[in-house]
Image (cartoon, rainbow, N blue to C red):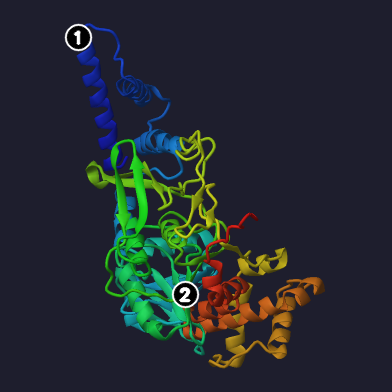
Amino acid sequence: MSHSGRYIRQTLLVAAACFFFAHLKAQSEPPSDDVTRDSLKFAAIISAVDKNYVDPVSADHVILDGGIRGMLTALDPFSAFFDRDQFEMLQQQARGEALGFGSILYVTPGKVLVLQTAQGSPSFRAGLGPGDEIVAINGQRVDRLSFEELVNLLRSSRSHPVRLGVIHPGRLISQDFELKPAEVALPTVDRTFLLSPGVGYLHISGFELKTPQEVIVALKDLDAPHLKGLLLDLRGNHGGIVDSAVAVASLFLKPGELVLTVRGRAMPEKTSKTVSAPEQSTLPLVVLVNGDTASAAEVLAAALQEHDRAVIAGEPTYGKGVVQTVMNLSEDTGLALTTGQYFTPSGRSIQRPLPGTALAATEASLDPAPHTFHTDDGRPLAASGGITPDVAIPARALDPWITFLDQTGTFTNFAENYMTLHGRATDSFQTTPAVLEDFREYLARHQIRAPEEYWSKDLDYLKLRIKSELFNLVFGLSRGDEVITKGDAQVERAASLLAKVPQILKRPQVAKLPP
C-alpha cells in the first residue's frame, strides 16, 4: 500500500469516527446535509471491506481508483485525482519541462531509432542524433525484448542513469553511452518556417508559461515585419494555461480587448482582457483548427474570430470550455476539479454538452431564451459548443492501406533500409520513380501487398511520407515535419485564404428594402 493511499484511508476512517461519536453525543436525528450523510456511508463501507473482504485489500485500488477516481469520473471527463508522481509530472508540464534525456524516439518491436534530440539535453551532449539506433539499454538487447517489455524499459529508464548501446548511421559496431536524466525544456512552439516566400507558418502544441515568449521569438525568426501573412496552426493543441493563451492573444489584438469570461458557482465572475504586448503583429492571420483543438486553444481562436482579427479555418473544435482548478492536497497529491465555464467575448459557451455526465447540459443550453451571437463587425457565429470555422476545410482522408502502412512503421523502416543501401539523403532529395520502385520491392520482400487501386491513388502521399521519414532520420524531426506540413492539402488551402482575409472578415451587407 502506498503512503498516500494509507494516509487517505486513515483520514476517511478518522472522519467517520468523528461523525459517529458526534452523532452519539448529540442524541439527535441523522445528519441532514448530503455531504456528511454520504461521507458516513462511504467510510462505513470502506471500513467493512477493509475488515471483512476475503483477501487483504489495496487502499490504492479501492479508495483511489474505485472511490475517488470513480466519483470524479461520474462528474465529467476532466476532473481528476493525481497521486504524488502524477502531480509532479503535472507541475513539470506547467513549467514546460520533463525529466529525461531529451530524445524523441521511434519505437517498434525490436527496434528503437532516435528521431530528434533537444538542444542542450543529455542526449544532445552525448552526441546522439537523428538516425542513431539504440540496440541495448542497460545491457539488455532491444531485439530480444517484446514490445511491451521494451516500452516499460524505456519508461523506467527516464528517471535513472542509463547505459545505451548505440549504432550510428553507416556503422556496424555499437558504441556505449552513459546518460544521466535531467530537466529538459519542451518547446510549445514546435514548428516555425516559411510555407512560401512571405507566408509564415507557426504551430503551437500547447499553452505553458513560456509560450507567449516562444511566439515572440518565432515571429522574429520569421521576420514578421516583412511577411505578407501568417498561418497559426492550433491543430492538436489540447490547451493548457489559459493566461498564456490570453497573453498570446495580446500579440495580435489591441490592448483592452475582452478575451474570455469565467463563471462558476463557487468563484466570482472573472474577465480576462488583452494587455500591451512588447511585440504586436498586424499581419493578415488565418488560424487552422480541428477536432483536437481544445480548451485554451479554443479560447484564443474564439477571441481572434470574434474581434474580426483572424479567419478561422479547418474543422470544428473539440468543445472543452470548463475551468479546472488544481488544488494541492496532503502527501504531495493534487486534485483537478471543474469549477467554472469559459465564455467568449460575445458570450458563447465553448463547452459542448456531454450526455451522461454533470455537463450533460451546459449553462448556455439551459438558457430559456437562446441568444444569437455576432463578431464585433456583425458576422453571425455558431453557438453549439466549440468553435465553428469561418471556412470549412476537411483534413486529408487516409484509406485503410495507407493507415496500415503508417501504423506498422513501414515508412520509417523503409527509410532506414534505404539509407543502409544508398547512404544519407541530401537536402535536395526527391522521391523519384526509382525510389518508389525500391519501396514497392521493399513491400514485396516483407509480404505487404500494394493493391494497384490504392497505389495509384495514394502516389502523392507515398512520395511525401517517404521523403519526410528520410529527412527525420537525416536532418531531424523538425525537417520531416516541415516536409509533411508543406505537403498537407489542409495547410495549403488555409494558407491560400491569407490573400482573402479582409474579404472574408467583411461585415455582411444588409439588403435594403425598396421604398
The residue lying furthest to the left in this view is 25
Question: Looking at the image, which residue is at 36% across and 20% down?
Answer: 41
Q: Amino acid at mark 1?
A: Ala
Of all residues, the one furthest to the right in this rendering is 452
489 is higher (above) or lower (below) than 243: below
Q: Which mark is residue 169?
A: none
Q: In the rendered structure, which amino acid carries the disc numbered 2? A: Pro
**Residue at mark 1:** 26
**Residue 428 on image: x %, y %:** 57, 93
Percent of width and height locating residue 77: 46, 43
Residue 489: % across, % down? 62, 73
User: Vertically, is 44 above or below 462?
Assistant: above
Residue 210 horizontal side relative to residue 300, left or right:
left
Residue at numbered disc 2: 284
* Mark 1 element type: helix
How many neighbours does mark 2 have within 10 angstroms: few (below 14), some (14-19), or many (20 or more)? many
